[in-house]
Image (cartoon, grey):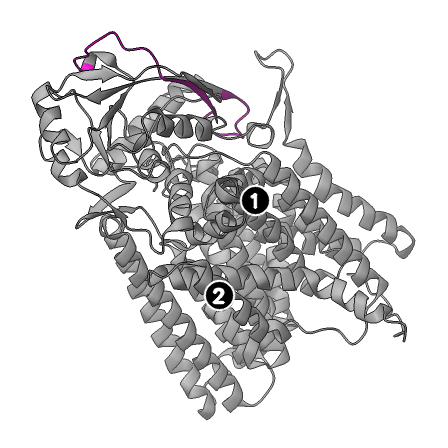
Amino acid sequence: MTRTAHLPLRADGRPRAATGVVVAPERILLVLVMLALSAGLWVSVGWHTPWTVLPTAALGTLLAWRIVPAPARVTAAERRGAILALAASGTWAVAAAVLHAEYLIVVRDPGFLSLAGLWLVDHPDSDIPSLGAIDAAAVDSSALADASQAWNLRGEEVQPQGARLLSALIAVGGWVAGDRGVLVANSIVGAVGVLAIYVLARRMLGPLAALAPAAAVGLSVSHIGLSRAAYTEPLTLVLVLAAALWLWRGVEERRAGPLLLGAVTAGATSFLRIDGAAFAAGLLVATVLALALAEGSRARRAAAALGVIAVQGGVLYAGYGALWRWSEGYADRLADQAVTLMVGYGALTLVLAVWAATWLGGGDRVATSARDMLGRRGAIGAGVAVSALLAVLASRPLWMTAHRSTDDPVDQFTNSVVEGFQRAQGLEVDATRTYAEHTVAWVSYYLTWPLVLLGIVGFGLATAWMIRRRPGWALLLGATLPTSLLYFWNPEVVPDQLWAFRRFEPATLPGFAIAAAVAAWWIVDRVRADWRVRARRIAAGAFVVLPLTTWVSIMPGAALPVSGATPVFIREMGGAYEQITALCEVAPDRPIILAGTSSHFGSLRVMCDEPTVLALASLTPAQLVDMAAVWDTAPVVLTRDVDWFDWSAEPEAVVTSTVRQTSYTLQGIPRTYFDRSYTWYAGIVGEDGVLTPVAPGAVEAGAAPAETVVTSR
């Protein structure tokens, strides 16, 4: 760990500016968290507008401003570290925004999350009126007013799948910069995620060493790829690490404000993800344990613990309530998992609350006596046990192969998807493989094995130091280890990359990066004094160079001897925006009958803002007449298969497009992409149900993929 002398204060205004620079990374984090909390609050009550979200975020930021304390003195190292962190994250944000994804065709989660964000730019809630589509779809069982799992009817309205916080937040980008602002917004979240890692690591490593884990995550292919599209995981990373930071500060500085803000932030993960309780539970246990081990009066610590338990639990359960209100179909499908999480979290809070209430009578001695009994050797033993557990999990490919069932319908679907991926890559076909034994190896794809091994050591060190030196280390462990261990053992995800690694982006990736830096600097501090500066530079360089090595693969003799990581170098779904925009312009102001593919249902309903019916099979002229009778204006049929309908003349393509997408890859970072060509035809439904072709103004659009629809798990 580096130690730097404080610079003397000056009367020329320089210290105030230097202080502003040092606290800027955390205050930027605070602003984003407040904006996210505000957006999540108002979208949950159906009042998501600029006039509610922005003033609330501004008020929250103002009230919480002093939670980020301005240091009395600033060192040169602190100023230099903050400047480098700000410059690097700003550069990162620009680079990510330049190649932001256009994930507007729904084959996976970013599609409906982006579209829900676009909808919320101009609407106060995410329920999308069907506008007669239900009646029109009633003509045939193959016609739907919603689409598979991503879009579900609730009464007369269509609900996008999933929690709303991310969509509500990226909609703020739309208020600033229109559609492109929505698509770019998650890149900004990813950049703030890099700052969150820096700010949390700074509490443990110092202002310069903290740059190392921030750089490692910022340069990882996973963080780059998941931030460019509307994945929830980068924002989850921000909330989890911000909560850990503020809870840690509240414990060590004995302040209620940071504890309250940390509890709210941790609880808000349920507004973002259905598994939010798993992240919140780890943070809650860590906070209560740290308070039990901390110095200070028992009454104050017990009150603080009970306050955190109450506030975090209240926010968390409100998030699950909002999920059931605004995505009922999704919540019902995953009700078993959600109820298990909520019941488990409730039981945990009850146990912790009862324990905290006993502290006034000395109940905290359960923790302090255990610490004293363990002593130095016991603390070391606990650290070794944690590292050993992680090492055993990493070794599983040597002695096990994990499989999923063949009985459950969802597992059967997943098995068919995995088999397709295996055949496409020329791998041995074993459709039931989950690849769960490789989950620690997945982290190595993005951080490399040297950093993963250092991380295993670092988690052991953090455990030992939590017991013997500084209870606050519990917050690092609680924020990152519980969900890591859960998903290492059973990730419950289709195992292609980057998709599967989403499970490990919010906590495992930053946790391993920080733990690796802890171990690296611990080792550096034990080398000879005259070698130490050089050793620090080598260690810092490794955290930059090692993740960069994953960007390019060199395999002499292979069909593709030199290849790059496609999530870094291509625009995901490039061409999708132009395609959907062009389809909306084919026959504006008309209801839409989309024939053949569910992937475009939400795209057309949201971006064209017209009632949309999905036809999964051909329709007769009579059925089209019955559909058209629902609306005052004859609908337009959009199809890629002209044989499904009768035409009054030979139709010509009205939109031709290609969309580019990263390939689905098992056991490695994707290094190829594929382009899918789309040719669309359009016809207006006539009085006899025969389609009158729309005159082609054939619009060219982007570049792209095969349409394998894989739903979220």
Report the residue at 76% width, 62% height from top.
Answer: 21
Q: Which mark is residue 260?
A: none
In this view, 180 is above or below 352: above
Q: Amino acid at mark 1?
A: Ser
In this view, 64 is above or below 429: below
Instruction: Give the residue at mark 1.
Output: 187
**Which quadrant of the figure has residue 357?**
bottom left
Q: Which residues are magenta?
A: 644-673
Give the SS element for disc 1. Answer: helix
Quadrant placement of the N terminus: bottom right
Instruction: Give the residue at mark 2.
Output: 265
Report the residue at 83% width, 66% height from top.
Answer: 75
Horizontally, residue 11 falls left or right of residue 435, namely right
Residue 528 lies, in percent from the top left, at 87, 54
Residue 554 lies, in percent from the top left, at 65, 20
Give the SS element for disc 2. Answer: helix
Q: Kindly tell me whether residue 374 is visible in this rendering.
A: no
Q: Amino acid at mark 2?
A: Thr
Q: Foreground residue, 153 or 534? A: 153
Query: Mark 2 or mark 1, which has the lower sequence index?
Result: 1
Magenta-drawn stretch contains 548: no
Horizontally, residue 80 falls left or right of residue 170, namely right
Other residues around mark 1 within 10 Å, as few (<14) / some (14–19) / many (≥20): many
Q: Foreground residue, 109 or 340? A: 109
**Which quadrant of the figure has residue 447?**
top right
